[in-house]
Image: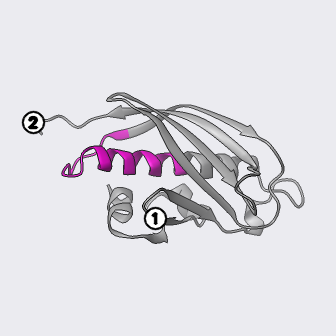
Amino acid sequence: MALAQALRSDRHGRLDMLPYARLLDLRFEQDDEEVRLVMPFSIGLVGSPGRLHGGAIAGLLEIAGLAAVILAQQGAQPDADRLPRLRPVTVTADFMREGTPVDTIAAAEVTRLGRRIINVSSRAWQVDRGRPIAMANINFLADWPDAGA
């Protein structure tokens, strides 16, 4: 999985391996605590005049959740070359304030790392992390490759 390799080997970079992340021009930066995604403002992300489109914000939240799950899986199984195929089952986004024409940052936390179901909480903010513009709860279904394959 190209995303897992990028997150494993780099502290920052672009997420060009996912088509929607490439469309949003997402970049990542990470430290020992978390991975953060940065969505640079672009006029193509505008929905209503002067506001970010909700779909772009929701996509950012979902991809931040995916990155958090990949890092959590690698932490739980650092020697594993195989990661599960992750499919979002439920994405519930809460839009708390309008997204303005500035860069948007998102980070996520895995709240439950089960073998089949993984629960994640994502948050997006712009200037102040304490004033999120949106949050999401995401449930991923993990499809593990066969052990014998």
Which quadrant holds residue 83? Answer: top left
Q: State the separation of the CA atoms marked 1 and 2.
A: 35 Å
Precedes in sequence: disc 1 or disc 2: 1
Q: Amino acid at mark 2?
A: Gly
- In the depicted view, which residue is nearer to us: 21 or 131? 131
Place of residue 20 in the rendered image (x, y in percent of width and height, measured from the top left): 55, 56
Q: Which residue, given by chain and number where applicable, does mark 1 sit on?
A: 31
Q: In the image, what residue occupies the spot 32% across and 68% down?
A: 9
Q: Amino acid at mark 1?
A: Asp
Magenta region: which residues? 64-85
Q: Which numbered circle lies on residue 66? A: none
User: Which secondary structure, mark 2?
Assistant: loop
Quadrant (top left, top right, bottom left, bottom right) of the N terminus: bottom left
Quadrant (top left, top right, bottom left, bottom right) of the C terminus: top left
Place of residue 14 in the rendered image (x, y in percent of width and height, measured from the top left): 49, 69
Asked if 115 appears above or below 28 in the picture, the reply is above
On screen, residue 46 versus residue 20, left or right, reads right
Q: Which numbered circle lies on residue 148? A: 2
Residue reaching furthest right? 49
